[in-house]
Amino acid sequence: MKSLYRVGASVAALALLVTAAACSSENAVNRDDDDTSGGKGGGTYGLKIAVVTHGAAGDAFWSIVKNGVEKAGTDLGDTVQYSSDGDPQKQAQLIDAAVNQKVDGLVVSMANPDALKASVEKAVAAGIPVITINSGASRSKEFGALTHIGQDEKVAGEAVGTELANQGVKNVVCVIHEAGNVGLEERCAAVGATLGGQIQNLQVDINNLQAAQSTIKAKLQSDTAIDGVVTLGGPVANVAAAGIAEAASPAKLATFDLNAEVAKGVQDGKILFAVDQQPYLQGYMAVTMLTQYKANLNVLGGGQQVLTGPALVTKENAAQVAELAAAGTR
């Protein structure tokens, strides 16, 4: 699973960016820094940045992204507006509203790129710099975004498939919790590419986790050959673990994305491992990078995707990560 740590270069670059952010002020280059906060925030850039995601209400993953967004705003002295809607048409309307407000920068996740294309291109045409995060990496440059911050879904999925194969898993159900989310579909396809066995997708709704648990349980009861379950989000992993137990299935569970309960599940052996794309960094670095672009025309990655993952949470490191997850930063 060493391939899950192909983030070193990007992380080093991100560290340099944070240093740069701490040493600039008021959207100007080579000015004296009047910040006396001692590194505790209180920057003076004063930009207005809108963040519009496809996150569902109550999804802990997007709460972590939001935490990163708000911390960056505090550290840099920016005003950040976070909004989200799982309906792509409504998300597009939120983007349009931000453009009409003439924000200084825009962060967008693109689970359904085609539905957002016109709105993102409208922002770019209006001179608003855009950074995409989390989903939609393959379309980001096409729409005119500066860069994309997130996880390479193909790399992550292939690593998961490889590890499951190493664990002897041969028949996997991959649980998709958001219909039409291209990133989730990419994950399942990549798992299947290296599994060397059978994989089938199972659709559930993250907004109805009790029903999702029942669907997973029923699937395992109806197909006893299934020996592996892959979930694509922390909340679904938790109900999948319950569904596996209720079905008395020997299926092994692995998941993408992390929350405190998932970290505890890995500790307890209920979950083999969790693939963490570090959502806090996606929010924090998007705001930071937009601020640096406005201040100094800096862009990380040379137009290529800036990776925040995948990183692997296993039984060996789950206890340490669980503490951070409880604090809302992992």
Image: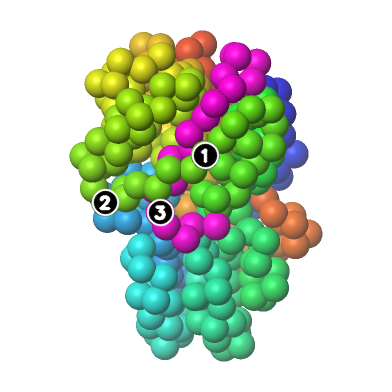
Where is residue 91, by image quadrant?
Answer: bottom left
Using a 10 Å C-alpha cutoff, classify the residue at mark 3 as few (fewer than 14 neighbours), some (14 to 19) or many (20 or more): many
User: How far is disc 2 from disc 1 in space, using C-alphas?
Assistant: 22 Å
Numbered disc 1: secondary structure: strand
Mark earlier in primary sequence (2, 1): 1
Is 73 contained in the magenta span? Answer: no
Question: How many numbered markers are drawn?
Answer: 3
- Label 3 amino acid? Glu
Q: Which residue is depicted at the point 55% across and 74% down?
A: 114
Amino acid type assigned to the residue bearing label 1 in the image: Gln
Instruction: Looking at the image, tell me whether mark 2 or mark 3 is earlier in sequence order.
Output: 3
Crowd tier of the residue under label 1, counting other residues whose Cα lies within 10 Å: few below 14, some 14–19, many 20 or above:
some
Left-right relation of 73 to 292: left
Q: Residue furthest front?
A: 222
Q: Is residue 46 left or right of residue 156?
A: left
The magenta stretch is 165-182
In this rendering, the answer to whether 155 lies above or below 240 is below
At x 42%, y 88%, the residue is: 100
Residue type marked 2: Asn
Query: What residue does disc 1 label?
Result: 200
Give the mark toward the camera: 1 or 3. 1
- Residue 64: x and y, percent? 38, 45
Secondary structure type for disc 3: loop
Between 116 and 161, the one lying in front of the other is 161
Between 26 and 188, which is closer to the camera in this rendering?
188
In-image side of 218 versus 121 (left or right) = left
Q: Position of residue 290 (x, y in %)?
A: 57, 65
State the quadrant of the N terminus: top right
> What residue is pinned by disc 3?
178
Specify whether 155 is left or right of 174.
right
Vertically, is 146 above or below 272?
Answer: below
